Image (spheres, rainbow, N blue to C red):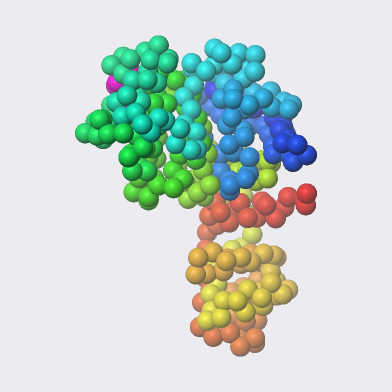
Amino acid sequence: MTNNMDAIVINDISKKYGTTSVLQNISFSVRQGELFGLIGPDGAGKTTLFKILVTLLPADSGQAQVVGRDVVQDYKKLRILIGYMPGRFSLYPDLSVQENLSFFATVFGTTIEANYELIQDIYSQLEPFKNRLAGKLSGGMKQKLALCCALIHKPEVLFLDEPTTGVDAVSRKEFWEMLRRLKERGLTILVSTPYMDEAGLCDRIALIQTGQILAVDTPEGITQSFGKALYAVRAANTYQLIQDLRQAPFTASVYAFGEYLHLTTQSETTTPEQIVAYLQARQHQGLEIKKITPTIEDSFMALMAQQPAA
């Protein structure tokens, strides 16, 4: 699995809290200079894995290396080589923007001026508010300040745990544009998110659910491996529609997806006309059906269905 181009290597990491298994034999690697996404819902194990990788929590078993250093044995050396932005805003709310940034620079034995070129693109948006208390910033501005503080010591790898949770759509878009520019400068970035639409913004992704990796590939590779015909279906009575489709002999799976139901069929030979005929025989009105390309979310649902029951 490992090679000299891997910035992060994770081998069989497992973790339990009491009798609850949070991570189960997690293994994957992140290449140098890669923007890698860990994609999964709340409770999937993303934050626990991040805490292990940034040396804040020991694993029960397995090993992990970041920039060639073991996260347990070399934790002191490693902490100055990584930047970490936890899921919750963890800066000092009663210090100003400028004071927070100066504090984190001092902790790492540097100054804002020494590494300003790395954060200039982001900090320029904060500078007009540099004397405002961090606790008084908007969600998007807090996010930018936290990113600046994680970058101020010029880390080799950046860990961002759900950085866009709870911020508006415009701030989410801006944040991912910032990450793309940082990636272009050669920075390795591991970012976790529950938002499936953000998966397509990564070079590669790992899908995680209930502490298990479902797949690791490029976003395109994940969707191309979907392997079944997929249809968007809707009708006047959505509740009855899903009940009838669940009982249909041609159905592999069906679930709500916005204003449509997403239907996968058992066989590629099932036609839209056969589906319509089945539903019309059950008195459905206002039928609409179209074949569609799978999304990351569709792929995630399909991979979840393949997992053995716990």
Residue depicted at 45% across the width and 39% down the height? 163
Residue 256 locus on image (x, y percent): 57, 66
Image: 263 above or below 94? below
Image: 245 above or below 94? below
Image: 241 above or below 26? below
Residue 21 locus on image (x, y percent): 74, 39
Quick check: can you spot residue 181?
A: no
Residue span colored magenta: 115-119
Q: Using the rendered view, name the quadrant where residue 91 is placed.
A: top left
**16, 2: nearer the viewer:** 16
Residue 101 locus on image (x, y percent): 34, 24
Image: 108 above or below 63? above
**230, 114: nearer the viewer:** 114
Q: Is residue 31 found left or right of 147 in the rendered image?
A: right
Residue depicted at 54% across the width and 12% down the height? 77
Residue depicted at 65% across the width and 55% down the height? 302
Residue depicted at 67% across the width and 52% down the height? 304
For the N terminus, the image quarter is: top right
**185, 111: nearer the viewer:** 111
Indicate yes or no whether the magenta region holds residue 116.
yes
Residue 279 locus on image (x, y percent): 62, 81
